[in-house]
Image: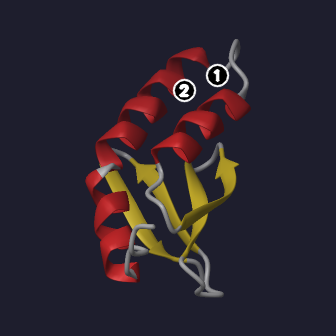
Amino acid sequence: MSTPLSNQEIWKAIQANAGLLAQLAGRWLDEQEYEDIAEYAAVVKASLPEGATFVKMTKRPFGFTFRMGTMPRLFRQFVRGNAVITQEVK
């Protein structure tokens, strides 16, 4: 059995994966009329590190909401312009 990732390790892994979200956002801009957002959610879910829980995908702004470990707070990662932003949901 492996040691669970700390919240800091989960945060770093999600930050490191920001490029994937940027790529998906670019594709979504081109294909949103033809593709289901659930397909993008499946890719995001599969990319999350152990200990991160996917909550929901959003179209505007393009991104997703997640939890880290057992923390009750929500966080989100989304694309704004050319930037990928990760922050706590307030």
- Residue type highlighted by circle 2: Trp
Is residue 30 rendered to the left or right of residue 82?
A: right
Counting from the top left corner in percent of width and height, residue 73 is at: 61, 85
Q: In this view, does 27 lie to the left or right of 71?
A: left
- Tell me the kind of residue under disc 1: Gln
The N terminus, quarter of image:
bottom left
Label drawn at residue 10: none
Q: Residue furthest top?
A: 34
Can residue 62 be seen here? The reply is no
Name the spot of residue 49 as percent of width and height, x first: 43, 57
Q: What's the mark number on residue 32?
A: 1
Q: Which residue is drawn at 33% across and 49% down?
A: 17
- Say if residue 21 shows up in the picture: yes
Residue at 52%, 25% in the rendered image? 29
Task: Say above or below: 20 vs 39.
Answer: below
Q: Is the residue under label 2 in contact with that under label 1 (CB below 8 Å)?
A: yes
How many residues crowd mark 1 within 10 Å: few (<14), some (14–19), many (20+)? few
